[in-house]
Image (cartoon, grey):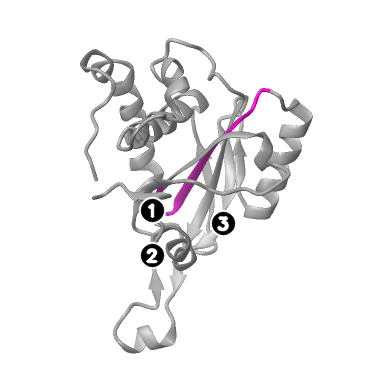
């Protein structure tokens, strides 16, 4: 995987450094802790800082591949030069639970529970009716936490977007992080880690392990 530096030295020492510092605080408080199968997490966040950091990480990932880059229009917002992203954008969070290893693997010495210990970036594929209204869908996975950014095409109305978000959250057991609140209760249940591995790890075009 190609290493990519942030946009520029001045930006890296200023607004982008503040985003990384904020992400480090979340890492210490939440992301380094593996969530079990029955835990409920009260996840506290700053919506603007979190969204800008998720978009920054996604933009850096985009730049490991040839243009055009879907996240490039978000750069002024990432850098704090614009107060709002160029498209109406939502953030969802869900929990990846430990996977239960098959009996034959346990017999060969594998642990019974396979904990979600990986970090990466990828794409969640949504079907219709939401698909036609989605401008960008990108997730960042850090151990037990799955954070999904959804940006919407301008043609869609707010009631339609709300309907899509509610259905996505209901189907995938995710929770929306809203601008006007700073804490949500998240329960485990998007998928278990073995299911997550089988869905995304072989698909190198849609998932990049950020540790490598």
Could you tell me if the residues under marks 3 and 1 are in contact, i.e. CB atoms within 8 Å? no
Q: How crowded is mark 3: few (under 14 residues within 10 Å), some or many (20 or more)?
A: many
Q: Point out the stretch of residues depicted in magenta.
A: 141-154
Judged from the image, the secondary structure of the residue bearing numbered disc 2 is loop
N-term-proximal mark, 1 vs 2: 2
What's the CA distance linking mark 3 and mark 1? 13 Å
Q: Name the residue under label 2.
A: 115
What's the CA distance linking mark 3 and mark 2? 14 Å
| Quarter-of-image position of residue 188 | bottom right
Seen in the picture, residue 212 relative to 2 is either above or below; the reply is: below
Could you tell me if the residues under marks 1 and 2 are in contact, i.e. CB atoms within 8 Å? yes
Q: Which residue is drawn at 39% across and 57% down?
A: 34
Judged from the image, the secondary structure of the residue bearing numbered disc 3 is loop
Where is residue 212 drawn, in percent x and y? 23, 50
Q: Mark 3 points at which residue?
A: 190
Q: Residue at x 62, y 48 (%)?
A: 126
N-term-proximal mark, 3 vs 1: 1
- Main secondary structure along the magenta-highlighted residues: strand
| Left or right, residue 100 beside residue 160 | left
Q: Which residue is drawn at 67% across and 34% down?
A: 133
Per the image, is 57 magenta? no
Work out whether residue 75 or residue 169 is closer to the camera in this orientation and state it. Answer: 75
Judged from the image, the secondary structure of the residue bearing numbered disc 1 is loop
Q: Name the residue under label 1.
A: 143
- Identity of the residue furthest to the top in this view: 81
| Left or right, residue 159 beside residue 27 | right
Work out whether residue 29 or residue 172 is closer to the camera in this orientation and state it. Answer: 172
């Amino acid at each position: 995987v190609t290493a990519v530096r942030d946009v520029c030295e001045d930006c890296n020492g200023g607004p982008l450094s503040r985003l990384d510092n904020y992400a480090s605080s979340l890492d210490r408080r939440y992301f380094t802790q593996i969530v079990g199968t029955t835990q409920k997490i009260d996840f506290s966040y700053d919506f603007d800082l979190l969204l800008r950091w998720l978009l920054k990480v996604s933009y850096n990932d985009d730049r490991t591949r040839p243009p055009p880059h879907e996240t490039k229009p978000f750069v002024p917002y990432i850098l704090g030069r614009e107060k709002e992203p160029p498209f109406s954008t939502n953030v969802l969070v869900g929990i990846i639970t430990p996977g239960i290893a098959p009996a034959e693997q346990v017999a060969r010495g594998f642990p019974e529970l396979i904990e979600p210990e990986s970090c990466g970036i990828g794409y969640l594929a949504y079907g219709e009716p939401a698909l036609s209204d989605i401008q960008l869908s990108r997730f960042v996975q850090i151990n037990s936490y799955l954070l999904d950014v959804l940006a919407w095409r301008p043609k869609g109305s707010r009631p339609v977007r709300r309907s899509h978000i509610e259905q996505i959250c209901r189907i995938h057991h995710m929770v929306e992080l809203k601008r006007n609140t700073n804490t949500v209760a998240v329960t485990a249940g998007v998928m278990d880690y073995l299911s997550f591995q089988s869905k995304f790890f072989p698909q190198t075009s849609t998932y990049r392990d950020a540790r490598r």
